[in-house]
Amino acid sequence: MNKAQREIYRVLTNEVDWSLCAFCKYAEFQGCECGVACDHPLGDRLPACDFALDSGEDCWGFRPAYSVTFMADVVGIILEKGWQSAMWWENKEGKLLIAGMA
């Protein structure tokens, strides 16, 4: 994915002051205290291999784990609810659910 293709993802995550890692298929979330690790096959050649990117930073290794439409919905809900953090999951019926905290 080239830089121009990643721009929409950067814009969406920037709206909620998150990094691209929040929606990257290579991100491994280690819990609230430990943050995120990058499990990209190219490992240490990426800017975020040992830590999460800051909001607005680009990563050439980013690969979306979700569609732009889904990400826009998540970001919209977060903004509407005024949440600082959120999580989402898929239920047994395949419906995606989201919860957050202000």
Image (cartoon, rainbow, N blue to C red):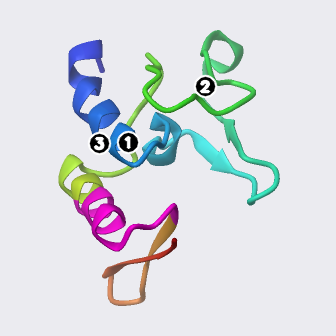
- The N terminus appears in which quarter of the rendering? top left
Residue 32 position by quadrant: bottom right
Which mark is in front, 1 or 2? 1
Question: Disc 3 to disc 1, how far (Cα)?
Answer: 4 Å
Q: Residues within 10 Å of mark 3 (few under 14, many from 20)?
A: many
Residue farthest to the top?
A: 45
Question: Disc 2 to disc 3, how far (Cα)?
Answer: 25 Å
The secondary structure type at the circle numbered 2 is loop
Name the amino acid, label 1: Thr
Q: Are dots 3 and 1 in contact, CB under 8 Å?
A: yes
Query: Is 76 rendered above or below residue 58?
Result: below
**What is the number of callouts on the image?**
3
The secondary structure type at the circle numbered 1 is helix
Name the amino acid, label 3: Leu
Q: Which residue is mark 1?
A: 13
Q: Which mark is residue 41?
A: 2
Query: Is 20 rendered above or below residue 15?
Result: above
Which residue occupies the foreground of this view, 51 or 66? 51
Which residue occupies the foreground of this view, 36 or 61? 36
Q: Is residue 23 magenta?
A: no
Q: Is residue 84 magenta?
A: yes
Identify the magenta region.
73-85
Q: Position of residue 27 (x, y in %)?
A: 59, 42
Q: Which residue is mark 3?
A: 12
Residue farthest to the left?
A: 69
Q: Residues within 10 Å of mark 2 (few under 14, many from 20)?
A: few
The secondary structure type at the circle numbered 3 is helix
